[in-house]
Image (cartoon, rainbow, N blue to C red):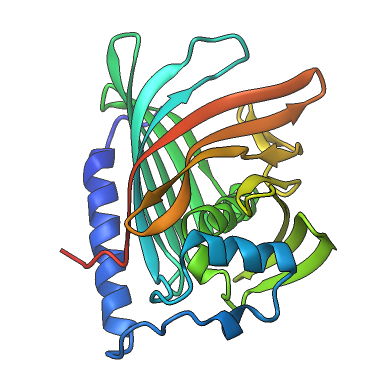
């Protein structure tokens, strides 16, 4: 276990600052384009309706998003769960997902840090600010976290679903499949919509579960609910993170959104 290095809070804040500054430097001085109904023409019908119902049409296409949420995380089925707060910053053109979770375990502070930059991911968990008890990197987690980036895009930024890296497939009037290519990785997911044109589930077989330090292939899903208007956008405010284990589904995370903001400027 590593006991050295800067705090995860410092590392997360530095990564956010550096990514946002680099994104701002690379970005055109022109404002983001306004999403038009005609831009949705190549999408499956349920995806078009979802984007329209979200309120994204007529607004600038988002280049990034910051999300703050409360969460309950579980290490195994049947646990009451560890309450935590989470903050993440995503960029869609200069791809990044910077996620920091703060909690307490056994009365001690816990920090979990996910960093996805370009097409490479790391995941670390540190106890009491000293002992790194989880330290993952490499192709397996990088490909798996590409699914998380795709999920964030679908859930938090419907107006960005015209991204050219997305290849859509028609399934039926309430279901669509999508392939997302980012750098070395191409991942696939299926999206399910209800009669109110809300995205209510997302599942993928390309995000394995971490078990005893290794990765096990399992279906990952994120049931969504409690749609509300946030800054003019109609979005889900509650989501679950579920792995389909052989003995039954394991809901390891429950998330409640506190705030969503788009195109956050560098500090």
Left or right: 137 with respect to 261?
right
**Residue at x-position 29% and y-position 48%:** 12
Vertical placement of 188 versus 44: above or below? above
Residue toward you, 215 or 170? 170
Vertical placement of 244 versus 164: above or below? above
**Residue at x-position 51% and y-position 82%:** 36
Quarter where residue 29 is shown: bottom left
Q: Position of residue 44 (x, y in %)?
A: 74, 69
**Residue at x-position 31% and y-position 85%:** 31
Residue toward you, 256 or 106? 256
Vertical placement of 92 versus 39: above or below? above
Of the 4 image quadrants, the one containing the N terminus is top left
Of the 4 image quadrants, the one containing the C terminus is bottom left
Instruction: Examine the rendering and report whether any part of residue 214 can be seen.
Output: no
Q: Position of residue 108 (x, y in %)?
A: 28, 15
Q: Position of residue 33 (x, y in %)?
A: 41, 85
């Amino acid at each position: 276990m590593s006991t050295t290095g800067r705090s995860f809070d410092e590392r997360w804040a530095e990564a956010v600052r550096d990514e946002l500054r680099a994104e701002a430097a690379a970005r055109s001085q022109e404002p983001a384009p306004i999403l038009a109904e005609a831009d949705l023409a190549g999408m499956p019908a349920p995806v078009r309706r979802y984007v329209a119902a979200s309120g994204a049409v007529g607004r600038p296409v988002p280049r990034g998003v910051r999300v703050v949420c409360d969460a309950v995380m579980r290490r195994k089925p049947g646990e009451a769960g560890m309450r935590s707060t989470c903050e993440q910053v995503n960029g869609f053109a200069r791809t990044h997902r910077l996620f920091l979770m703060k909690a307490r375990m056994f009365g001690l502070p816990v920090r979990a840090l996910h960093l996805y930059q370009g097409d490479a991911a790391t995941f670390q968990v540190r106890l009491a600010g000293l002992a790194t008890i989880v330290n993952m990197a490499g192709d397996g987690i990088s490909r798996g976290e590409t699914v998380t980036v795709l999920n964030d895009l679908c859930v938090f930024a419907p107006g960005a679903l015209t991204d050219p890296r997305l290849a859509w497939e028609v399934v039926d009037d309430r279901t669509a499949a999508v392939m997302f290519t980012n750098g070395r990785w191409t991942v696939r997911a299926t999206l399910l919509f209800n009669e109110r044109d809300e995205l209510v589930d997302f599942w993928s077989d390309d995000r394995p579960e971490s078990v005893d330090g290794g990765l096990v292939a399992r279906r990952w899903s994120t049931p969504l609910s409690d749609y509300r208007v946030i800054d003019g956008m109609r979005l889900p405010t509650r989501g679950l993170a579920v792995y389909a284990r052989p003995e039954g589904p394991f809901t390891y995370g429950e998330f409640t959104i506190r705030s969503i903001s788009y195109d956050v400027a560098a500090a």
